[in-house]
Image (spheres, rainbow, N blue to C red):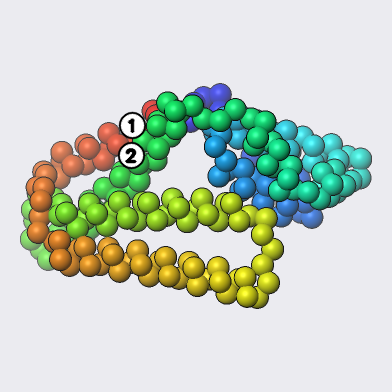
């Protein structure tokens, strides 16, 4: 995220605190829905700024969000998304790469924590971090599943569910979580032979580099 986008994000965060509680739920759903749109983060913040402005102006006139926007929130969001420029191929590639590096850095940090925990519990000090094929596959599966689930939930932000709908949503989340956990456990059981051995200092530098690379690409 560049400096201009960060400044706009901070400004939006500060201004949205003035939104009345009765308008917060709809506003939040609109923002969540827009987060799944094919727009750059800067354009998302521009849209967010406009929405906040509309809501705050309405509040000053004594109008709630339904009176300001007419209640067709999803349709309004779809119109906004359609009017805004889409990410270019280069922006999409950099966006995906930044997410991949960020997720890899998180998984790498967890691996370092596990390595240190193993030192403490076993008393066997080793400077080598062992990476198996199972670790790599399970990491990819976790990142892919988490990204898809977040995107799915963003797209369903405006759906009002009855009891059956909530049950279906719960079952969907349960099945996906069960499959992901099963795949990761099986991978780490049957593909546990170390494929890569890396000195912990080099591994830590790599994790820091991935963190930095992800921030730069943002």
Name the residue rendered at 10%, 63% in the picture. 123
Q: Which mark is residue 47?
A: none
Farthest-out residue, right: 61
Name the residue: 10% across, 55% down.
194
- Name which of mark 1 and mark 2 comes first in the sequence: 2
Judging depth in this view, the residue of 78 and 6 nearest the camera is 78
The residue lying at 71 percent from left, 55 percent from top is 25
Residue for badge 1: 213
Residue 16 in the figure: left or right of residue 182: right
Left or right of 48: which side holds 70? Answer: right
**Count of numbered badges drawn on the protein:** 2
Does residue 188 appear left or right of residue 37 in this picture?
Answer: left
Residue for badge 2: 101
Above or below, comparing residue 99 to residue 22 in the picture:
above
Q: What residue sits 15% from the left and 61% below the top?
A: 191
Q: Would you say 186 lies left or right of 91 here?
A: left
Q: Residue 158 at what x, y percent from top left?
A: 67, 55
What SS does tag 2 mark? helix
Asked whether residue 14 is in view, the answer is no
The picture quadrant where one finds residue 161 is bottom right
For label 1, count other residues whose C-alpha is less than 10 Å away and answer few (under 14), some (14-19) or many (20+).
some
| In the rendered image, the vertical position of residue 97 relative to residue 156, given as above or below | above
Q: Quadrant of the C terminus?
A: top left
- Image x and y of residue 169, in percent: 55, 68
Query: x%, y% of residue 156?
Result: 61, 56
Say if mark 1 contacts mark 2, CB within 8 Å. yes
Give the SS element for disc 1.
helix
Q: Is residue 24 above or below residue 172?
A: above
């Amino acid at each position: 995220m560049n400096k201009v986008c960060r400044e706009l994000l901070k400004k939006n965060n500060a201004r949205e605190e003035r939104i009345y509680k009765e308008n917060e739920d709809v506003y939040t759903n609109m923002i969540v829905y827009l987060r799944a749109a094919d727009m750059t983060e800067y354009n998302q913040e521009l849209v967010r700024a406009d929405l906040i402005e509309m809501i705050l102006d309405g509040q000053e006139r004594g109008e709630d969000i339904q009176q300001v926007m007419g209640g067709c929130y999803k349709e309004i969001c779809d119109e906004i998304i359609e009017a805004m420029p889409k990410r270019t191929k280069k922006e999409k590639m950099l966006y995906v790469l930044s997410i991949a590096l960020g997720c890899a850095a998180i998984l790498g940090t967890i691996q370092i924590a596990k390595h240190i925990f193993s030192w403490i519990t076993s008393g066997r000090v080793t400077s080598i971090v062992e990476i198996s094929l199972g670790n790599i596959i399970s990491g990819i599966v976790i990142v892919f599943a988490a990204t898809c689930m977040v995107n799915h939930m963003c797209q369903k932000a405006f759906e009002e569910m009855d009891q059956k709908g909530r049950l279906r949503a719960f079952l969907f989340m349960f099945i996906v979580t069960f499959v992901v956990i099963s795949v990761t456990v099986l991978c780490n059981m049957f593909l546990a032979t170390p494929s890569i051995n890396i000195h912990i200092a080099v591994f830590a530098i790599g994790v820091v580099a991935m963190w930095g690379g992800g921030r730069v690409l943002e």
